[in-house]
Each structure stands twice: as structure tokens, then as C-alpha cells.
Amino acid sequence: MTASPLLAVRDLRVLIGGRHILHGVDLDVAPQGVTALLGRNGAGKTTTVRGVLGLVPRTGSVLLDGEETVGLPTHTLVRRGIGYAPEDRGIFAGLTVAENLRLAERRGADGPAYGLVHELFPELKRREKQSAGTLSGGQQQMVAIGRTLLNGNRLIIADEPTKGLAPKVVTEVAQVLERAAEAVPVLLVEQNLAVVRRLARHCVVLADGRTAHQGEADGLLGDAEATRRLLGVGRGPLAPFTAEADS
């Protein structure tokens, strides 16, 4: 990564209930495109995301565009431009697509960016009166990612967006993320290495609550031995990474 990172995490440590979950994670998120966060089950990926967002007690340094955010509450981080699409999507099934998006609006000088959301995901405009609970998994991810694009965020964090989805829907979600990353940088927690290869230029691998690797995604995924050693994938670098998401 040659340009200065948009997000720079240094020595991130998390202690929950007397148990050390993260032992000093370092990672950089590129200022453009997709940076993938990888690791085996229990490596600390979701805890790292929660640490960045201030959802768990943390120490260390988390710089967003050079500004320290450790010590700030989550709602302040959201206002400073971090959008979060959680693992379960966080969709309100009984509300329409339009109502789900409206709930995500924040006050801002330019107002919510519905033009951008509908340009990237015209399906949401066509289905704005449809109940979100009747959408496909891929369409629900459009809603989840669309909400993060409404408010001029500087970074989107997407946690396991393809988990549990059929292969056809995985392709649909990859297209959603690809379009979103054209507008806003994305930190992607992902199991499926084929999706990572398609989307990510940079990657970070965690192991036992520490950073085990950081570099170009193609370099890692093109090295079968390194992929097997770091991720436990035994059938070549493009085999699906099927470990369950860590907690």
C-alpha cells in the first residue's frame, strides 16, 4: 500500500470478561477499493471490527484519516464517517425498503445521498414499497450497504456479507460490494476466497488475535502454501473459505 491508509490500526487490544481476545492487531485500510480482513474461526476478525467501532473496550490506536478515534463513543465514530453493515444485515423485515433507508438518514449539509444509492442499486428504487423481509439475500445486502452510502461516509465496514448464501446470491452480493467500493472504501470481513480475489487489492490475516499477514491480496491468494498455512484452506488458493465467522 503506497498511499497513506484511510484507517490505520496499531496495537489494538481487547479484554472482555478477563479474557484477552486481541493481543495487538495492526492493520491498514486502503483509501480506495476493498481491503479484506481474513482469518480462521476464532482469529478475532469480528472483535477487531467491533474494536474499531468502539463496540467493545479497546486500547491501542485507531486513526481515521489521521485522527485518533480510540476513546470516542460509537455514535461519534458513525458521525465521523464509518458506516457498518453487520453480519446479520440488520434489516427491519416488517418495514419497506424505503423505510429501512429512511431510518439510516443522518442530518448533514447535503442531505441523504439517495441519488448515489439509487444509481448504484436501481433495484432499491424499483422495490422501495416492498417489505424488506420479502427480499432475496442479495437484495437485503443492497439495503444494508445502501444505508451506509446515504450519509457521505468515508469508510464502509461489511462483516461476512456472503455468509450462508447460495452461490448465485454470493455473486449478486459481490456485485453489490463492487459497486459500493467505487464510491467508498470498504473493509470486508469475508470467508469466501473467490469473492476476496474478485474484490480486494489488499488483505490482512489474523491468527489468535494478532496480525499474521498484511499485503497484496493477489500475492497471498496466489500462494497455495501460504493460503493453507494462514487460512487452513487445503485445496488450493481459490477454494471457498468455509470456516464459520468468529465471535
Image (cartoon, helix red, strand yellow):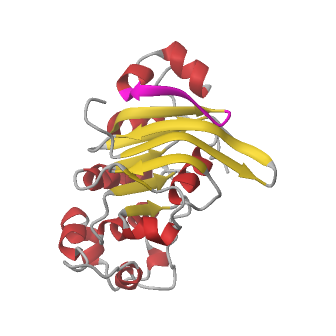
Look at the magenta stretch and give its main secondary structure.
strand
For the point 67% across and 51% down, the residue is 247
Judge whether 121 appears above or below 131 on screen.
above
In this view of the protein, which residue sits in the foreground, 24 or 37? Answer: 24
As drawn, 18 above or below 79:
above
Q: Is residue 238 visible?
A: no
In the image, residue 212 lies in the stretch drawn in magenta: yes
Left or right, residue 158 beside residue 179? right
Would residue 117 be counted in the magenta stretch? no
State the quadrant of the N terminus.
top left
Give the camera-side residue of 102 and 129.
102
Residue 219 can be seen, yes or no: yes
Look at 27% across and 67% down and name the residue there: 152
**Position in image of residue 82 (x %, y %):** 40, 61
Looking at the image, which is closer to me, 108 or 89?
A: 108
Q: How many marks?
A: 0
Decide: is 135 above or below 27. below
Which residue shows up at 39% across the image and 28% down it? 217
* Residue at figure coordinates x 45%, y 54% from the top left: 158
Q: Residue furthest right?
A: 18
How far from the left and from the top, in percent, is residue 43?
65, 38
Residue 10 in the image, given as x and y percentages of width and height: 50, 39
Magenta stretch bounds:
208-217
The percent position of residue 205, horizontal first and vertical second, equals: 53, 32
